[in-house]
Image (cartoon, rainbow, N blue to C red):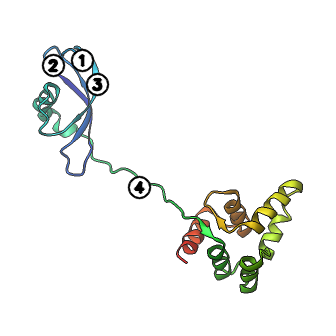
Amino acid sequence: MINIAKLKYTNPEQTNIDMEVTIDEGTANQYVKAGDVIPFHYVPGDNSPVALAVRDALPQYGGQIGAYTPPPPPPEVFKTLSDVQLFTQLATGGYINNEEALAAVSSGDLPALFINALNNIGGKDKFQMQIKLQGATTFAWGSDLAKFVQTAMAAGDEDFKQFWRAASAL
Protein backbone atom coordinates (compact mmCIF):
# COMPACT_ATOMS: atom_id res chain seq x y z
CA MET A 1 0.00 0.00 0.00
CA ILE A 2 1.22 3.49 -0.78
CA ASN A 3 1.80 6.15 1.86
CA ILE A 4 0.23 9.56 1.39
CA ALA A 5 1.21 12.76 3.21
CA LYS A 6 0.58 16.52 3.07
CA LEU A 7 -2.86 16.24 1.51
CA LYS A 8 -4.56 19.49 0.50
CA TYR A 9 -7.58 20.27 -1.66
CA THR A 10 -6.70 22.40 -4.68
CA ASN A 11 -10.14 23.50 -5.79
CA PRO A 12 -13.27 24.86 -4.10
CA GLU A 13 -15.29 21.75 -5.02
CA GLN A 14 -12.82 19.67 -3.00
CA THR A 15 -12.35 17.01 -5.67
CA ASN A 16 -8.70 17.59 -6.62
CA ILE A 17 -5.97 16.96 -4.07
CA ASP A 18 -2.25 17.71 -3.98
CA MET A 19 -0.15 15.35 -1.89
CA GLU A 20 3.13 13.56 -1.50
CA VAL A 21 3.00 9.88 -2.35
CA THR A 22 5.58 7.34 -1.26
CA ILE A 23 5.64 4.63 -3.94
CA ASP A 24 5.32 1.00 -2.88
CA GLU A 25 6.37 -2.15 -4.74
CA GLY A 26 2.92 -2.56 -6.31
CA THR A 27 2.91 0.86 -7.97
CA ALA A 28 6.62 1.07 -8.85
CA ASN A 29 7.40 1.08 -12.57
CA GLN A 30 10.12 2.13 -15.00
CA TYR A 31 9.68 5.79 -13.99
CA VAL A 32 9.32 5.57 -10.21
CA LYS A 33 10.83 3.01 -7.88
CA ALA A 34 9.61 1.77 -4.54
CA GLY A 35 10.43 4.25 -1.78
CA ASP A 36 10.37 7.33 -4.06
CA VAL A 37 8.43 10.26 -2.65
CA ILE A 38 6.74 12.20 -5.43
CA PRO A 39 4.41 15.18 -5.52
CA PHE A 40 1.10 14.06 -6.93
CA HIS A 41 -2.05 15.86 -8.04
CA TYR A 42 -5.07 13.59 -7.76
CA VAL A 43 -7.97 14.23 -10.12
CA PRO A 44 -11.00 11.93 -10.09
CA GLY A 45 -11.15 9.87 -13.27
CA ASP A 46 -7.37 9.54 -13.60
CA ASN A 47 -6.77 5.81 -14.21
CA SER A 48 -2.97 5.78 -13.94
CA PRO A 49 -1.59 3.14 -11.55
CA VAL A 50 -0.57 5.76 -8.97
CA ALA A 51 -3.94 7.51 -9.23
CA LEU A 52 -5.79 4.24 -8.72
CA ALA A 53 -3.62 3.42 -5.70
CA VAL A 54 -4.25 6.90 -4.31
CA ARG A 55 -8.01 6.56 -4.91
CA ASP A 56 -8.06 3.29 -3.00
CA ALA A 57 -5.99 4.72 -0.13
CA LEU A 58 -7.84 8.06 0.21
CA PRO A 59 -10.72 6.88 2.44
CA GLN A 60 -8.35 6.27 5.35
CA TYR A 61 -7.06 9.87 5.02
CA GLY A 62 -10.47 11.54 4.69
CA GLY A 63 -10.30 13.72 7.79
CA GLN A 64 -6.67 14.66 7.22
CA ILE A 65 -7.07 16.59 3.98
CA GLY A 66 -6.21 20.27 4.31
CA ALA A 67 -8.83 22.80 3.32
CA TYR A 68 -8.73 24.57 -0.03
CA THR A 69 -7.05 27.95 0.18
CA PRO A 70 -7.84 30.25 -2.74
CA PRO A 71 -4.82 31.84 -4.37
CA PRO A 72 -4.09 35.43 -3.45
CA PRO A 73 -5.55 38.02 -5.80
CA PRO A 74 -3.20 39.20 -8.50
CA PRO A 75 -1.33 42.38 -7.67
CA GLU A 76 -3.09 45.55 -8.67
CA VAL A 77 -1.86 47.00 -11.94
CA PHE A 78 -1.78 50.77 -12.04
CA LYS A 79 -2.22 52.59 -15.33
CA THR A 80 0.18 55.21 -16.58
CA LEU A 81 -1.27 58.67 -16.00
CA SER A 82 -1.25 61.50 -18.48
CA ASP A 83 -0.08 64.89 -17.27
CA VAL A 84 -3.70 66.07 -17.52
CA GLN A 85 -4.89 63.27 -15.22
CA LEU A 86 -2.08 63.83 -12.73
CA PHE A 87 -2.39 67.61 -12.44
CA THR A 88 -6.19 67.53 -12.49
CA GLN A 89 -6.16 65.09 -9.55
CA LEU A 90 -3.55 67.17 -7.72
CA ALA A 91 -5.88 70.17 -8.08
CA THR A 92 -8.98 68.17 -7.18
CA GLY A 93 -7.22 66.88 -4.08
CA GLY A 94 -6.21 70.39 -3.02
CA TYR A 95 -2.46 69.82 -3.43
CA ILE A 96 -2.20 72.55 -6.07
CA ASN A 97 -4.63 75.20 -7.33
CA ASN A 98 -6.41 75.15 -10.69
CA GLU A 99 -4.12 77.79 -12.19
CA GLU A 100 -1.04 75.72 -11.31
CA ALA A 101 -2.63 72.66 -12.92
CA LEU A 102 -3.41 74.57 -16.11
CA ALA A 103 0.12 76.03 -16.25
CA ALA A 104 1.67 72.60 -15.71
CA VAL A 105 -0.17 70.98 -18.62
CA SER A 106 -0.05 73.94 -20.99
CA SER A 107 3.52 75.23 -20.55
CA GLY A 108 5.26 72.77 -18.25
CA ASP A 109 5.45 75.24 -15.36
CA LEU A 110 5.91 73.34 -12.15
CA PRO A 111 3.49 73.93 -9.27
CA ALA A 112 4.78 75.21 -5.93
CA LEU A 113 4.29 71.71 -4.50
CA PHE A 114 6.94 70.37 -6.90
CA ILE A 115 9.28 73.35 -6.56
CA ASN A 116 9.28 72.95 -2.78
CA ALA A 117 10.02 69.24 -3.10
CA LEU A 118 12.78 69.92 -5.63
CA ASN A 119 14.43 72.25 -3.13
CA ASN A 120 14.98 69.20 -0.92
CA ILE A 121 17.05 67.51 -3.64
CA GLY A 122 20.67 68.42 -4.08
CA GLY A 123 22.82 69.34 -7.08
CA LYS A 124 22.73 67.28 -10.26
CA ASP A 125 19.85 65.12 -9.01
CA LYS A 126 17.69 68.23 -8.62
CA PHE A 127 18.33 69.34 -12.20
CA GLN A 128 17.69 65.84 -13.61
CA MET A 129 14.38 65.56 -11.74
CA GLN A 130 13.34 69.09 -12.72
CA ILE A 131 13.97 68.52 -16.40
CA LYS A 132 12.11 65.18 -16.30
CA LEU A 133 9.15 66.81 -14.57
CA GLN A 134 8.98 69.75 -16.96
CA GLY A 135 9.09 67.49 -19.99
CA ALA A 136 6.86 64.71 -18.71
CA THR A 137 3.57 64.07 -20.46
CA THR A 138 3.05 60.67 -18.79
CA PHE A 139 3.70 59.32 -15.30
CA ALA A 140 4.20 55.57 -14.90
CA TRP A 141 3.41 53.87 -11.59
CA GLY A 142 6.61 53.03 -9.71
CA SER A 143 8.79 55.37 -11.79
CA ASP A 144 11.08 57.94 -10.23
CA LEU A 145 8.57 60.60 -11.32
CA ALA A 146 5.71 58.86 -9.51
CA LYS A 147 7.88 58.44 -6.41
CA PHE A 148 8.73 62.16 -6.56
CA VAL A 149 5.02 63.06 -6.74
CA GLN A 150 4.27 60.82 -3.75
CA THR A 151 7.08 62.43 -1.76
CA ALA A 152 5.97 65.93 -2.76
CA MET A 153 2.44 65.11 -1.60
CA ALA A 154 3.78 63.58 1.63
CA ALA A 155 1.39 60.72 0.94
CA GLY A 156 1.61 57.26 2.47
CA ASP A 157 1.46 54.23 0.21
CA GLU A 158 -2.28 53.59 0.59
CA ASP A 159 -3.17 57.28 0.18
CA PHE A 160 -1.04 57.47 -2.94
CA LYS A 161 -2.69 54.37 -4.38
CA GLN A 162 -6.09 55.99 -3.80
CA PHE A 163 -4.85 59.18 -5.43
CA TRP A 164 -3.56 57.22 -8.45
CA ARG A 165 -6.81 55.25 -8.79
CA ALA A 166 -8.82 58.48 -8.75
CA ALA A 167 -6.53 60.07 -11.33
CA SER A 168 -6.77 56.95 -13.53
CA ALA A 169 -10.55 57.28 -13.55
CA LEU A 170 -10.42 60.80 -15.03
Residue at x-position 41% and y-position 55%: 73
Q: CA distance from mark 2 to mark 3?
A: 12 Å
Say what secondary structure mark 1 lies in: loop
| Label located before the other in sequence (4 or 3) | 3
How many residues crowd around disc 3 within 10 Å: few (fewer than 14), some, or many (20 or more)? few
Q: Are marks 4 and 2 in contact (CB under 8 Å)?
A: no
Residue at x-position 82% and y-position 65%: 118
State which quadrant residue 135 falls in: bottom right
Q: Are marks 1 and 2 in contact (CB under 8 Å)?
A: yes
Residue at x-position 52% and y-position 75%: 169
**39 up-or-down from 162: above or below:** above
Q: Are marks 4 and 3 in contact (CB under 8 Å)?
A: no
Q: CA distance from mark 1 to mark 2?
A: 8 Å
Q: CA distance from mark 3 to mark 1?
A: 9 Å
Q: Amino acid at mark 1?
A: Val
Q: Amino acid at mark 3?
A: Ile
Q: What residue is shown with label 3?
A: 38
Residue 8 appears left or right of 120: left
